[in-house]
Image: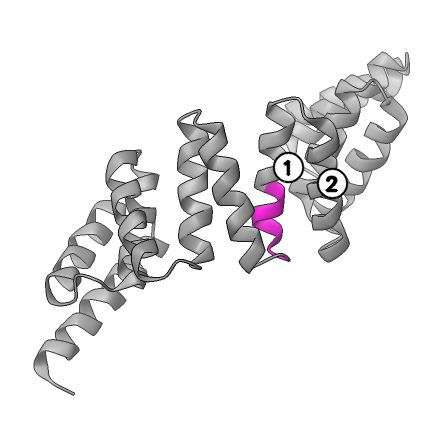
Amino acid sequence: MSLEIKSNYANALQAKICFNLQQYEETIQFLSKALEINPKDKTILTLRGGAYFYLDKHNNAIRDLNKSLETEHNNATALFLRGEIFYCLNHFHEAFLDFYDALKFEPDNTDMLVLRGEAYLNLEHYYNALLNLEKALEILPENVAALFYSGKIFFELEQYGRVLSYSSEALKIEPGFVPILILRGSAYYCLKKYKEALEDFKENQSY
């Protein structure tokens, strides 16, 4: 292995460690050194795009992800991440195009399904949101985020019994999840089950 390749490997490895430690500025420094040696490395470009995203440097992130996708059009991770950025920037059309393309390559990726479901929920497209969340739950029934967002949809639809079903299932998996306690407490309140509502709100305050 040449000295240059060893150096690039060391930079990339240190970058991954820093990324896992949420040290994103240091991640970018190591990845930028690696890209000086191999400027078209799709994995390094995608990882640096992710680091820029977590630092809210969206333009830099999109630039890196675009370069990564020029090298590998079916890079689901880059598509998904770019979709997240577009969504954060309220560029919903571009976001959904990227989510759609990413899920073509990884149709059983529950993180992507849940995020697309959340995006549909926030746009009040409840039917499409539920399709994505139900598929995520078919793959991973104990997906707390999918259960939570499903509950939120049924709350908006005033189907409070179903809210209780989803939120109670989620709380079996993650008992101290405050947003779900608030959601279930609100559903109990709407059903005039005031004692149960008060218990959930009191439990929420204990966390």
Q: Quadrant of residue 202?
A: top right
Dominant SS of magenta comes to helix
Give the camera-side residue of 41 and 188: 41
Q: Quadrant of residue 36?
A: bottom left
Is any part of residue 181 visible from this angle?
yes
The answer to which of marks 2 and 1 sits earlier in the sequence is 1
1 relative to 41, above or below: below
Q: Is residue 87 magenta?
A: no
Amino acid type of disc 2?
Leu
Point out which mark residue 131 bears. Answer: 2
Real-space CA distance between mark 2 and mark 1, rounded to the nearest whole angstrom: 8 Å
Residue extent of the magenta highlight: 108-114
Which residue bears the numbered disc 1? 117
Q: Residue at x 29, y 37 (%)?
A: 55
Q: Residue furthest bottom?
A: 1
Mark 1 packing: few (<14 Cα in 10 Å), some, or many (20+)? many
Q: What is the quadrant of the N terminus in the image? A: bottom left
Relative placement, left or right, of 205 versus 99 is right
Whole-percent x, y for residue 160 in the image: 86, 22
Q: Quadrant of the C terminus?
A: top right
Instruction: Name the residue at 43% across, 29% down.
Output: 88
The quadrant holding residue 198 is: top right
x then y, percent, for residue 68: 30, 56
Question: How many dots with numbers?
Answer: 2
Mark 2: few/some/many CA within 10 Å (<14, 14-19, 20+): some
Check if mark 2's residue and mark 1's residue have beta carbons within 8 Å.
yes
Residue 173 position in % (x across, y down): 73, 47
Q: Specify whether 98 is left or right of 134.
A: left
The amino acid at mark 1 is Gly
Label 2 secondary element: helix
Q: Secondary structure at mark 1?
A: helix
